[in-house]
Amino acid sequence: MIESLTVMTAVQTLLEGFFDYAGLYPPAGLDLRTAASRYLDYACGERAWALGRFIVNADRLAELRATVSADGLRRFKLGAIVSNAADAEMILKEVEEGSPIDTVEIKWSKPSVSRGVIEIPESLTTYLEIQTGRQDEDTLDLIAGLGVRAKIRMGGVVAEAFPDASSVADVLSMLASRQLCFKATAGLHHPFRSSQRLTYEPESTRATMHGFLNLFCAAAAVYFGEGRGIAEDILQDEDRAAWQIDEGSLRWRNLSWTTEQIATVRREFFMSVGSCSFEEPIRDLEALGWL
């Protein structure tokens, strides 16, 4: 939380707890000790208010508890990734052991399971990962019926992992029409759509990555009824000058969202971004003068 502030600015409202740290996963691929240490550094740093959860596979939760001191673990907020029934059982055990888990992210090839089948406690927020480029309405209806949230994947370490803007706009529109909350993950290290290296290797190939500000503004557009066509335009826009922010509003070209509207989108629709880097998005925003 941002302390000592009675009123948050537009950028603070947009970014509070926005970046879930996934340093264990590609392209960072850090070992657990290093990733956990970095999370603790971020949690104690100047931009701690923008830090969300530490993302970790359920089968590594015991390893995390053995790696981090009890005092250190109390500074963590954990999002655990579940891939099978054994992982779900591990979640139950870890909650009993006192692990600070508050969200579960489920990876299933077909989301044909219910909260009861996987035995996730009702106290935990559950996300079900969907295929952004191959999503049908029946799947989203199922997620809505289960009372869980959606997780959309926006990239990876190969160019083919990045869904096109049209597919993303379609998914955002379908999510909004069902009032489904979602988080986004992968390939969202930078604010704006741009060509970037796919990994941290010097000779890495490049691809066009989606920007997390493009995605947020596209989500705000469909949430407030602007339509998927506008959302697609926002997702495709690579002109940094198209965005402006001040204390009370965020603007993309001729559209504008107040701090209150930004707060509504964050509370009721677009929850967070999973990123293997916390430093990259923060550095980019600082370079823009937004932080």
Image (cartoon, helix red, strand yellow):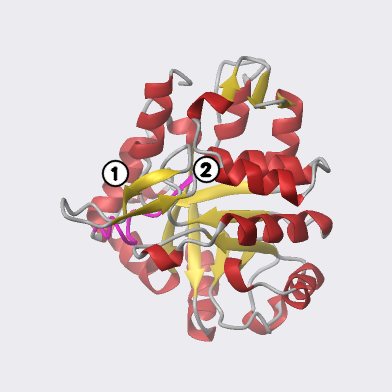
Direction from residue 49 to residue 219 in the image, left or right: right
Which residue does the image show at 47% across and 65% down from the upper left? Answer: 97
Looking at the rendering, which quadrant does residue 279 occupy? top left
Which element type, helix, strand or loop, lies under badge 1? helix
Q: Is residue 130 visible?
A: no
Which element type, helix, strand or loop, lies under badge 2? helix
From the image, which quarter does the N terminus lie in? top right
Looking at the rendering, which quadrant does residue 257 occupy? top right
Looking at the rendering, which quadrant does residue 39 occupy? top left
Q: Is residue 138 visible?
A: yes
- In magenta stretch: residue 23: yes
Label 1 sits on residue:
38
**Label ID, residue 212:** 2
Which sits in the foreground, 110 or 87? Answer: 110
**Label ID, residue 13:** none
Q: Amino acid at mark 2?
A: Phe
Q: Residues within 10 Å of mark 1 (few under 14, many from 20)?
A: some
Q: Residues within 10 Å of mark 2 (few under 14, many from 20)?
A: many
Stretch of the chain drawn in magenta:
18-30
Q: Amino acid at mark 1?
A: Arg
